Image (tube, rainbow, N blue to C red):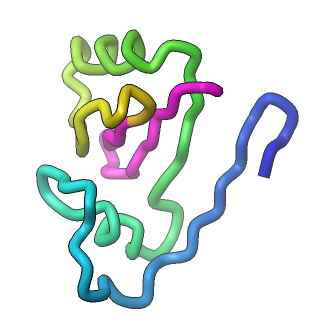
């Protein structure tokens, strides 16, 4: 849902992992496993410069779940383990 300059995304947890492995392999868990958790476990942020944001977070020792993917987005976690998706603004 687009809200002005913001984007609001609601995800429903998967009921099963299914037979197909995740195409995005993470350091600790698959993206599907992380998204199965009940409750507020994922937020997404749009940024103007994805590479600059990635490098700035890396310099500040943020824990990444993925590398920069397709030069468009990446996943990291906050100190409480909440999954954060950072995406290039279109």
Q: Eyeballing the image, is 68 above or below 50? A: below
Residue that appears at 78% across and 52% down: 1
Residue that appears at 50% across and 33% down: 87
Q: Judge by depth and name the residue closer to the eye, 18 or 29.
A: 18
Q: Dividing the picture into quarters, in which one does residue 31 lie? A: bottom left
Q: Is residue 64 left or right of residue 1?
A: left
View extreme (right): residue: 4
Q: Judge by depth and name the residue closer to the eye, 19 or 66.
A: 19
Residue 89 screen position, x and y as percent: 61, 26
Q: Eyeballing the image, is 73 above or below 37? A: above
Residue 19 screen position, x and y as percent: 24, 87
Q: Eyeballing the image, is 58 above or below 15? A: above
Q: How many marks?
A: 0
For the C terminus, the quadrant is top right
Q: Is residue 13 left or right of residue 64?
A: right
Q: Which residues are magenta?
A: 74-90
Q: Judge by depth and name the residue closer to the eye, 63 or 53.
A: 53
Residue that appears at 23% across and 64% down: 30
Q: Dividing the picture into quarters, in which one does residue 76 lie? A: top left
Residue that appears at 31% across and 51% down: 81
Q: Is residue 66 magenta?
A: no
């Amino acid at each position: 849902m687009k809200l002005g300059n913001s984007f609001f995304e609601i995800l429903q947890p998967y009921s099963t992992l299914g037979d197909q492995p995740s195409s995005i392999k993470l350091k600790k868990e698959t993206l599907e496993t992380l998204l199965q958790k009940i409750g507020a476990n994922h937020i997404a942020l749009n940024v103007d410069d994805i590479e600059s944001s990635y490098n700035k977070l890396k310099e500040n020792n943020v824990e990444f779940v993925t590398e920069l993917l397709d030069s468009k987005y990446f996943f990291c976690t906050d100190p409480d383990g909440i999954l954060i998706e950072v995406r290039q603004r279109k």
